[in-house]
Image: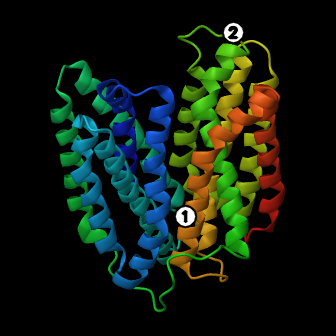
Amino acid sequence: MFFVIGFAAGAWAPLVPFAKQRLGLGDGALGLMLVSMGIGSIVAMPLAGALASRVGCRRVLVAAAASACAVFPVLATTTSVPLLAAALFLFGAGIGSLDCVINIQAIAVERDGGRSMMSGFHALYSLGGFAGAGAVSGLIGLDVGLLGVSLGVAGLMALSTLAATPGLMTRRAEEHHAPFALPRGAVLMIGVFCFVMFLAEGSALDWSAVFLRAERHAAPAAAGLGYVAFAITMTSGRLVGDRVVSALGLRRVAVVGAIVAATGLALATLSPGLAWPVVGYALLGAGCSNIVPALYTALGRQTDMPESQAVSAVSVLGYAGILSGPAGIGLVAGATSLTAALLGVAAMLAGVALGATRLRG
């Protein structure tokens, strides 16, 4: 199911330019349109977490996946702006619900299994993103029509969900909770850390190529190398992350990872040329790779809030970092410089390193 979420998000990314062209949208209008997907995710996450506590993870995950599958062909083919906005809201709600509830299940599975598994789960999300973007780009390159591409994506998601369904949990929480609640105690601390980590990931996705092009005068073909390095080390780090967490412990992984990430982003921002900034982005990916999985594991150990409610609250804060981070970096860069804005993110990562010393080991 982690793979399904990544695959869906990755499959949508190559279709965005086609939607922009088909509907005749400008950059600003497209940006506002895409916000509806984030709003759908943030609205759905607390509701999905509360519902999972009442009816079990399986029903919510299957329903959310079915919703995302059903709406995906509309994203690829509609010529109506209001319909695209509504479809993006529903797609975001489906993906957000999946993202929230599968982490609730992952915490329970890891705890029942008695060993670290969270990094491996999140690695499959990253691999799903690569597979989705690569598959759609390849099919488009073979001149497969957008309707055929979107039906293929929806079909693969449906088949994967069907294959996973027998293993999804049906047990319910012993006590129910309201969908919306402010995070408190350890949950608030973990949520703030997730906000920073997702903001840092967003800075690499949205700003690394811009920075290397504008500040380091990289050639257009080389400007994307920073994010490529980040994505490779992020995914590789998660593939081996469970062994690292077992060897070092959750607290050390979070502290050391945040130090490496902060150092990497500072190196990428302050180094001249192209080679050292790319190395810096590689360090940023390696440092970030296992922090969010470790934080979700930590949610399973706190007692300040019910587990499903805690996961919902932290998921919302994480998505808030994804949505607001790139725009915030742009605003700070406009008022000062892009270098200063990225160094501010590095300072926030250093704050995570300091705060993570309070996590349970």
Left or right, 242 with respect to 355, comes to left
> Would you call the spot at circle 1 few (<14 residues within 10 Å), some (14-19), or many (20 or more)?
many
Q: Which residue is mark 1?
A: 116
Q: Which residue is mark 2?
A: 217
Q: Tag 1 or tag 2, which sits nearer the N-term?
A: 1
Q: Is residue 266 visible?
A: no
Instruction: Kindly identify the residue that appears in the image at 75 percent across and 27 percent down.
Output: 338
Quadrant where the C terminus is found in the figure: bottom right
Q: Which quadrant of the view contains residue 274?
A: top right
Left or right, 300 with respect to 350, comes to left
Left or right, 181 with respect to 133, comes to right
Which one is nearer the viewer's eye here, 120 or 57?
A: 57
Mark 2 and mark 1: Cα distance apart in space: 43 Å
Left or right, 296 with respect to 38, comes to right
- Give the mark toward the camera: 2 or 1: 2
Q: Secondary structure at mark 2?
A: loop
